[in-house]
Amino acid sequence: MQARELVKRYGDREALRGVSFEALAGEQVAVIGPNGAGKTTLLSILAGIVRPDGGEVAVAGAVGWVPQQAALYRRLTVGENLLLFARLERHPDPRASCEEMLELTGLGERRGEIVARLSGGNQQRINIAIGLLARPAVLLLDEPSVGLDPRQRARLWEFVSGLAGGGTTVVFSTHDIQEAERYGGRLLVLADGEALFDGSPGELREAVRREAPEAADRDFETAFVAYLQHRGH
Ligand code: ATP
């Protein structure tokens, strides 16, 4: 996936000011940055939901979108939700697609359960299963681990890392810097609509050492906050 010089304006506000980046097959890219940095705007443009005012996105294959708020029908069962989305997406054989996703996400045993009664972690799995229905080459997740307990988080990342291991490009946003360091082979740091940094967690450490040496040996989150501050954010 390649994004070139993406620009998005909301009235006078520039949510993105020429952001470019590339993600290869099997890469896990974490998009991090302060509130209002443009993370959701970037992901929704990559997902094809929001049109940019400038720039372009090139993807070889389908894109799957896992929004922050799962658009699930809480009174329907797991299976009914998946079937509904497979139909909405006009799959040639919605039942087969639904079965495939239940299998892939380990939700088979829960197919008959009402969504409202599931744990947050299992609801997030359905959300991801819906994002995967299109068999995407690129999976985009907007703050996927919010509200999950540590065990559910670990399961989420194990699953997502498995997808990346199979060649899916994964791009996710998060406010959890430790999680970004752990699961983002690459980090894209956005602030005020601009890409401040694009590289590995190790390279970000090096950048902190250059620009905010007093924080270089602190924990990753502290180092990151110091880096942002040195960059005027
Ligand atoms: P957060 O970490 O708080 O989720 P974010 O990095 O995802 O923030 P965005 O939601 O992409 O940031 O917002 C970027 C900027 O664009 C913000 O200033 C926001 O107020 C503005 N913005 C986003 N969506 C809209 C919209 N639909 N209408 C007007 N302004 C918007």
Image (cartoon, rainbow, N blue to C red):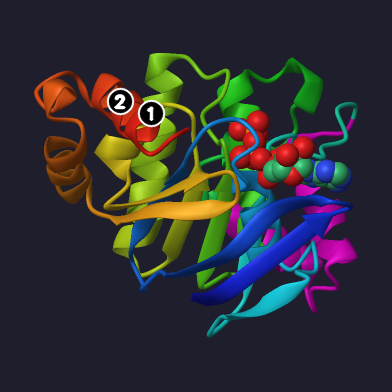
Q: Depth check: give the residue in front, 115 or 30.
A: 30
Give the Cα distance between marks 1 and 2. Answer: 5 Å
Q: Is residue 49 left or right of residue 138?
A: right
Q: Is residue 4 above or below residue 226?
A: below
- Does the segment drawn in magenta span residue 143? no
Q: Is residue 195 above or below residue 58?
A: above
Amino acid bearing label 2 = Ala
Badge 2 marks a residue whose secondary structure is: helix
Residue pictured at 68% horizontal, 20% vertical: 118
Q: Classify 10 Å Cα crowding around label 2: few (below 14), some (14-19), many (20 and above).
A: many
Question: Which residue is the site of mark 1?
Answer: 229
Q: Is mark 1 within 8 Å of ligand 1?
A: no
Residue pictured at 36% horizontal, 70% vertical: 167
Specify the label residue 132 is tagged with: none
Marks 2 and 1: in contact by CB < 8 Å?
Answer: yes
Q: Depth check: give the residue in front, 173 or 16.
A: 16
Numbered circles on residues, count? 2
Badge 1 marks a residue whose secondary structure is: helix
Q: Quadrant of residue 68?
A: top right
Question: Which residue is the site of mark 2?
Answer: 226
Task: Please say whether residue 168 is visible from this viewpoint.
Answer: yes
Q: Quadrant of residue 96?
A: bottom right
Q: Is residue 212 left or right of residue 111?
A: left
Amino acid bearing label 1 = Gln
Q: Quadrant of residue 204?
A: top left
Task: Pinpoint residue 74: horizontal percent, then vertical percent.
Answer: 85, 28
Task: Pinpoint residue 52: horizontal percent, then vertical percent.
Answer: 75, 69
Ligand 1 quadrant? top right
- Does the segment drawn in magenta span residue 84? yes
The boundaries of the magenta stretch are 76-102
Residue pictured at 33% horizontal, 63% vertical: 27
